[in-house]
Amino acid sequence: MNKLMSKFWLIVALVFTVTTFSTCSDDDDKKIDYAKQITGTYTGTANLAPGVEFDVVVSHKSENVVRFAVASFSIPATGITVPSVECDCTTSDLNGNVAFTGIAKDVTILGQTQDLNVSGTVNKNGNMNMNISLGIISVIYVGTKN
């Protein structure tokens, strides 16, 4: 009887050991690189003047960092040419959309040299809403990913 009880407890210990030890999957959240989700070329308009349309090229720089680039363009009927500009922005999730924000230091546009602030969102359909400000100049750009 003593041998039977020893085997019984050995089996109980074995069952306990097998059921309590198991492999665990990686509990770390999968990191999402939001920068990759918005990389591309966007065509849109800005509220500078009627007919102002230009492309914004968004390139992946590093994890959750993109570079926004706008080539030089002219504002119709004004004779004003806006020089090309680039700004690096960090990206993050904002209620299912990709948010971005960044500052380009010492940018000169129309004779003003100041920091250029860029912020906005890109939704799942590839629609971009971007706020661009340089001192007292504030521009809203609305574009769609090509």
Image (cartoon, rainbow, N blue to C red):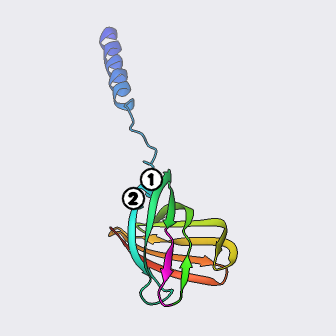
Q: Which of 46 and 36 is in front in this view?
A: 46
**Relative image position of residue 6 (x, y in whole percent):** 35, 13
Q: What stretch is highlighted in magenta?
A: 71-77
Residue at the image point whose x is 37% and y is 31% from the top: 22
Q: Mark 2 points at which residue?
A: 37
Labelled disc at residue 138: none
Going by the numbered disc 1, the residue's amino acid type is Asp
Give the side of residue 59 with respect to residue 15, left or right: right
Q: Mark 1 points at which residue?
A: 33
Going by the numbered disc 2, the residue's amino acid type is Gln
Q: Which of 42 and 94 is in front in this view?
A: 42
Give the side of residue 31 with respect to residue 79, left or right: left
Marks 2/1 in contact by CB < 8 Å: the verdict is yes
The answer to whether 79 is drawn above or below residue 89 in the figure is: below
**Relative image position of residue 96 (x, y in whole percent):** 40, 66
Q: How far apart are marks 2 and 1 (CA)?
A: 7 Å
Residue at the image point whose x is 63% and y is 80% from the top: 110
Asked which secondary structure carries label 2, the reply is: helix
Q: Does the magenta stretch include residue 74?
A: yes
**Relative image position of residue 144 (x, y in whole percent):** 36, 73
Asked which secondary structure carries label 1, the reply is: loop
